[in-house]
Amino acid sequence: MIRYLRLYAHFMRFSISKALEFRLDFFFRIFMDLVYYGIQIGFYQAIFMQTPLLGGWSRDQSLVFMGGYLVVDAISMTLFSNNMWMLPVAINRGDLDYYLVRPVSSLFFLSLRDFAANSLINLGFAVGILAWTVLRLPEPPHAVSLLLFLAMLPFGAVLHYQMHLVSLLPVFWMGSGSNLHGIFYSFARCMERPDRIFTGWIRRLLVSVLPFCLMASFPARVFLEGPHWPILLHFAAVITAFFLFIIFIWNRGLRAYSSASS
Amino acid sequence: MNIAWIFYLQGVKAALSYRAEFWINFAGSVGSQFCVAFFLWKAVFLARGTDTLQGFTFAGLMLYSLLVPLVERSVMAPDMMGIAGEIYDGGLSRYLLYPLAYFQVKYASSLAQSTLYQGQTAVILAVYAAVFGSSGITPVSLMMGLTAIAFAGWLGFWLLANLEMLAFWADNVWSLAVMNRMAGWLLGGGMIPLAFFPAWARSALEWLPYIRLLSFPIRCLLGQVGWSEWLFGLVMTVAWSLVFAGTASLLWRKGLRVYAGVGI
């Protein structure tokens, strides 16, 4: 474990020094995420000009949910996203060879080696927006609910990473993975809406097999409606199940991997 | 054979080279966007307890939401056009050595993708009309809409070309292209129809280019635009295209002076 932590510290150091070599791009990326945050706030303001409630939540409650998914997105962008972009390329071109021969978990290396320093700054902005939305609530938050909410958000980001990885793993068997990102990001929009607007089998799908609605909605529900054990257990069970599923598929994928031009 | 035509055909072949992915991506992105819009607006209509919102019925909003990803794919290339990449890796040099009109070639490739997406749009609209009825789409509105999409594709090309050519000076312009897409998504009426914006915002957006990329072609397809507004919209699209074509030409000339041709 200590070895992995030390390795991750090296990843962070290299990534930050690399990011600061391309300063204009570094600031462009920060600004890009700020535009995204502005668009999300603008969207919810426009929606609540039409309705008093969305999925059972008021404007203030929905803004807390929005702040939550901005934090989930920022954590995911900081830790995982750059690595996920490169994963299909590494598999397709045979670059995976270089990771397989190293004496550490190849999945750990490929998932975390690039730390997005610019997104760390955006994480600060996202946390600021979340704090602003929490302070807007008419009643002061319950301390336990708030702590659980804050503890669940990083796990929401882990689930986001897991779903991204699952969407990319077919590249082991397909010729190209360039379009797989597009599919993931299209589905990831479900994360940006309260889970209770979805109904029927689509809702069941979005809280189980494609758990985009768990990432931010469930933490927000714990915060806004109080701790509820079935929600917490459901959340933990899905993350664990996806972890095991990924390990299984990764190992199957490595068996199918035939180095360059696989 | 005309060089641009050759590049157009190559672009079609490239887009279809991974057919399964092409169609899976198409179905996944359009289906998921439509699904999110369906449940969002259903929740809003239920909470509000009304039949219409800003002049849209639920069915009308669903058709609008279906058209957004279809038109977006036709007018805003999903990926960058490769100009920035060619500047970074020196691939631009081959265009400079041979008697090729660079923007003509790039536009032909971009048009190839756009044509395929327009074909997909036509298929989806035909299926929709067969299942749910025409919903205001007539042969005239279809003609007006497809013309607006063609013009919007030209505008989208020049807009993105400007951003990509900043690669002559900037380390990476990918984030600018993403910002452009996000701005188009909100300010062009992709996220929600512009009718849901306050009046002052709608008046301001009328003079920006983004409204010509999404909202205007979609409203044309839906038969919500009269002849005079259609003509005004096309004139505005052409005007913005000419502005961006002019700045692209300027950036091209200035950029070539600093282009190092790495990779020759």
Image (tube, coloured by chain):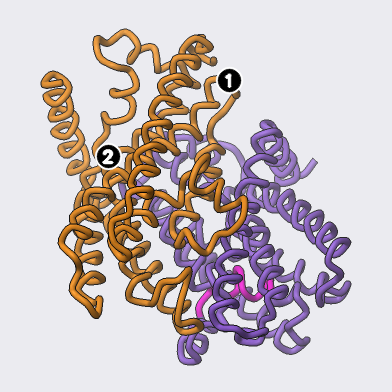
Chain colours: A orange, B purple
- Position of A48 relative to B190 (above/below): below
Kindly state the secondary structure of the residue where label 1 is placed: loop
Image quadrant in which the C terminus of chain B is located: top left
Residue B124 locus on image (x, y percent):
78, 56
Query: What x and y, as percent, mark residue A76?
Result: 32, 44
Q: Is residue B258 magenta?
A: no
**At 25% across and 60% down in the image, what residue appears?**
A126
Task: Give the residue number, with chain letter if any, for mark 2.
Answer: A79
Disc 1: which residue: A173
Residue B169 percent location from the top left of the image: 32, 51
Name the element at disc 2: helix
Figure quadrant of residue B87:
top left
Amino acid type of disc 1? Trp
Which quadrant does the N terminus of chain B fall into?
Answer: top right
Is the residue marked by circle 2 packed among few (<14), some (14-19), or many (20+) residues within 10 Å? Answer: many
Tell me where the magenta segment starts and ends, as one range: B208-218
Question: Mark 2 — on which chain does it sit?
Answer: A
Left or right position of A218 against A146: right
Q: Is residue A190 left or right of residue A72?
A: right
Mark carried by residue A99: none
The answer to whether any part of residue B246 appears in the image is: no
Residue B143 in which image quadrant:
bottom right
Q: Residue at x 25, y 14 (%)?
A: A104
Q: Quadrant of residue B99?
A: top right
Give the main secondary structure, helix, strand or loop, of the magenta stretch.
Answer: helix
Disc 1 chain ID? A
- Is A12 placed left or right of B51 in the picture? left
The residue lying at 25 percent from left, 55 percent from top is: A149
| Mark 2 and mark 1: Cα distance apart in space | 26 Å
Viewer-proximal residue among B135 and A144? A144
Specify the farthest residue to the bottom.
Answer: B199
B66 versus A191 height, above or below: below
